[in-house]
Amino acid sequence: MNLQELMKMPDRLPTETLENVFNQAIQDFQNQSNNENEFLEIIMELTDRQVMTYQLLDTEIRNTIDQILCSILNIEMYHNVDIILSIVINLGLENCFNLFTQFVESNVQMDKETYDEITAAIEEVGNHICNPYYDLEALKKDVKL
């Protein structure tokens, strides 16, 4: 799977198709068919499509992506942090989110732009990292009242 192939796919895909493509992207990265940057771009595109389903991604797939992102996170590269944060928030990846939180709490050396991006994400998500649809669910509850 490469980014050009993915871009030819529709913006909205059935859940099963998305899961298959996520798994293919993971496998391609693990087999070194795609480098870190290609993997991040592909996962970001898939995440955008996943968000449109308004469902959580399969737990096993989420956990695998979470582990990979934790392993490739480079706090010294703003672009890397920006993309990974977006994926983490939109897929609800708890381990990687906790890693970002630890960086801030431990005062890990990073540039101001990276620090601001991470702290803004932590504030936005609060205690609801595992459910990226928390705000929508809360809104639905309010509307039903």
Image (cartoon, rainbow, N blue to C red):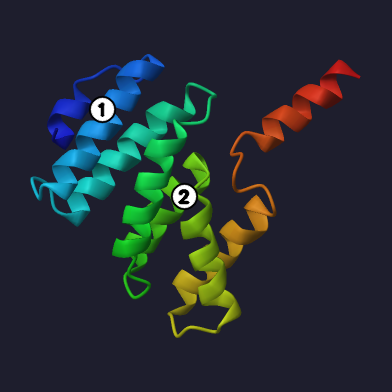
View extreme (right): residue: 145
Q: Position of residue 144 (x, y in %)?
A: 85, 17
Q: Amino acid at mark 2?
A: Val
View extreme (top): residue: 14
Which part of the image, by quadrant, shows the C terminus? top right
Q: Which residue is mark 2?
A: 88
Give the residue at x 29% y 16%: 10
Q: Position of residue 61 (x, y in %)?
A: 37, 37
Give the residue at x 55% y 73%: 102
Q: Which mark is residue 129?
A: none
Which part of the image, by quadrant, shows the N terminus? top left
Where 120 falls versus 21 (above or below)? below
Give the residue at x 10% y 50%: 32
Q: Position of residue 15 (x, y in %)?
A: 40, 18
Q: Amino acid at mark 1?
A: Val
View extreme (left): residue: 33
Task: Specify which label sits upstream in the sequence, 1 or 2.
Answer: 1
Of residue 2 and residue 69, the one placed in the foreground of this image is 69
Q: Which mark is residue 21?
A: 1
Which element is circle 2 on? helix
Of residue 32 and residue 44, the one placed in the foreground of this image is 32
Give the residue at x 13% y 35%: 2
> Neighbour class for label 2 at 10 Å: few (<14), some, many (≥20)?
many
Q: Position of residue 133 (x, y in %)?
A: 62, 33
